Image (spheres, rainbow, N blue to C red):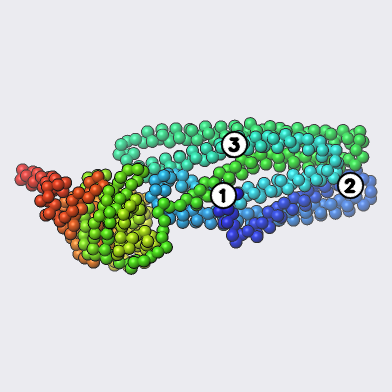
Amino acid sequence: MKKYAFVFSKLKGYRAKFLAAMVVTVLVGIPELFPTVIVGDIVDNVLKSDSPGRIALLWKYFIALVVITAATAIIRFIIREVCYFTGSHVSYGIRSALYEKLQTLDFGFYMQNPSGELISQMTTDVNIIQDFFGGYLYTFLRDCSLLVFTFVLLASKSLKVSLMMLAFVPIIVILATLLHSRTKMLHRTLRDKFSEINSYVNENLGAYRVVKAFAREDYEVDRLRIESEQYRDMAVGNTVKRLNYSTPIHITSEIMRIFVLCSCGILIVSAADGDLTVGNLTVFSTLVLTIAGRVRELSVMISQLQQFGVSVSKVTSLYESMPAIDNGDKIEGTTGKIKKIEFNDVTLILDGHMVLDHISFTVHAGETVAIMGPTGAGKTVLISMLLRLYDPSCGQILINNTDIREMDINELRKMIALSTQDVFLFSDTIDGNIAYSNPELPFEDVRRFAECAQAADFIEKLSEGYDTIIGERGVGLSGGQRQRIALARAVAKRSSLIILDDTTSAVDMETESLILQELRKITNKIKIIVAQRISSVVDADKIIVLENGRITEVGTHSELVAAGGYYTSIFNISQQGSSEVIADGKK
């Protein structure tokens, strides 16, 4: 029952109303049977009677039928309204809690959980839970209460017939139990396959440029067709399995109905039971039909309740997920302004692999530090550790002489602005993307930061200027344009540390030069630049060369050129490329 605690906690504010509605749902089953009894009395006391007052009695019965039917209908309507609002309230609470939880989880969680699964938990599973409170539970309790009250009423009319009917109950219970056990795992498997399809579609939509560039549309269609066929086959198998057990339940309920009606008829004709009348036979026929219908609905409800159980397990497991990186409650040394950053013998091991090996360096306020190295050297991981996307396996990262693990993680990240090569832009205006860290940022500042990133010229040429809506992930913009908007967004954060991870890789050399000139004007911040181009790091106060997770060179541009190491080789290659361009120009 522990897994249901999270879901039922979201009933807060509606618990009393919902509990009252469920109690009334059970109790209202009693007056719902009154019309059936009244019809039986009409047969015995009006249709088969010669009494002169039978017309007046018929009118009384008619008024009673109208009042009872109208009253129960109104009560049922109110109950359904309460259920609907409760379901909506619960789904809102669960979805909000899950989304808030997702914001607290770290890189490791997202690496292990595909986006399609998370989307299914946030949508499909939450909707199933909403339907449970909005209708499933109501229907289940209504059917159960009607079954119980109907048996009680039947027993009050004829104990013999009721016992005959009860003989069929064990058969129905056994079949229902088998149905539950055979389909329980199928629901979970079907749900997991649906998540896989969600993940595939989400991935494919994000990679549409690659798909079209390689003309692989047919291949992707075939892949989705195969996945969909597997889902279809599993769904059909699940349905067949359910029908294999629900159909016998239906047949058994129909045989029970026929058997009871025939038994009643025989008892009446033979006068074996003096309490049975033609009116009672009418009541019995109606009640047996009611029981048969409720039994059939309950077999369907078993499947719906199983889906509810699977969905509760999924959303609860997500809600109970804990980040590997905890947010400490100490905020010592957090001043909002970074004066010094120190990596003190930092080592990082991920999945048994040494990613960073005993990294040590210091950066002071106003300095520009560049990090270079071959692909896979650990440059991006290194700067990610400043944001606590990873924590050191050993060693310390200090900001203002305080271990960042002792800082509030949100306060820490507010002090850092990041712009990466892999740009993500939101489906919003250009203004909204640049001012993402501060939606109240004045337009004059937005434009100034765009100018700093050399983005103002192309933005103002767009039809709507800064109010232009950017498509998902920056559709409609070039790679360089997206990078410049992302750079403007980072600068607009006004943090004391700016991290630029290969931010100018998609812009031309002239634009990069202009961007670097603007960045040099920012003298009161720490700037960490990860780059592959010599032109991006030549003016840095300190250049760190990272190879295989280790620092192999540290120095200024001139010092490293003279050192004859990795940096020298990259410099020579860049110089050779420049000479070839000049020679070709002379040609």
In the image, what residue type sits under mark 2?
Val
Q: CA distance from mark 1 to mark 3?
A: 20 Å
Contact, mark 1 vs mark 3 (Cβ under 8 Å) = no
Q: What is the secondary structure assignment of the residue under circle 3?
A: helix
Residue at point 27%, 61% (across, down): 341
Residue 377 lies, in percent from the top left, at 25, 46
Q: What is the secondary structure assignment of the residue under circle 2?
A: helix
Q: For this view, does 236 lie left or right of residue 374?
A: right
In the image, what residue type sits under mark 1?
Lys
Q: Could one spot residue 394 in this view of the protein?
A: yes
Q: CA distance from mark 2 to mark 1?
A: 57 Å
Residue 494 lies, in percent from the top left, at 30, 64
In the image, what residue type sits under mark 3?
Thr
Residue 87 lies, in percent from the top left, at 59, 54
Q: Could one spot residue 432 in this view of the protein?
A: no
Residue at point 41%, 44% (across, down): 112
- Most extreme residue toward the right, as rendered? 51
Q: Which mark is residue 123?
A: none
Q: Nearer the viewer, residue 253 or 519?
A: 519
Residue 498 lies, in percent from the top left, at 27, 60
Which residue is identified by label 1? 3
Q: Which mark is residue 46?
A: 2
Which of pointers 2 and 1 indicates the residue nearer the eye? 1
Q: What is the secondary structure assignment of the residue under circle 1?
A: helix
Contact, mark 2 vs mark 1 (Cβ under 8 Å) = no
Q: Earlier in the sequence, mark 3 or mark 2?
A: 2
Q: Residues within 10 Å of mark 2 (few under 14, many from 20)?
A: many
Q: Which mark is residue 183?
A: 3
Q: For this view, does 94 lie left or right of residue 355?
A: right
Q: Is the C terminus in the top left, top right, bottom left or bottom right quadrant?
A: top left
Q: Which corner quadrant of the image does residue 256 belong to?
A: top right
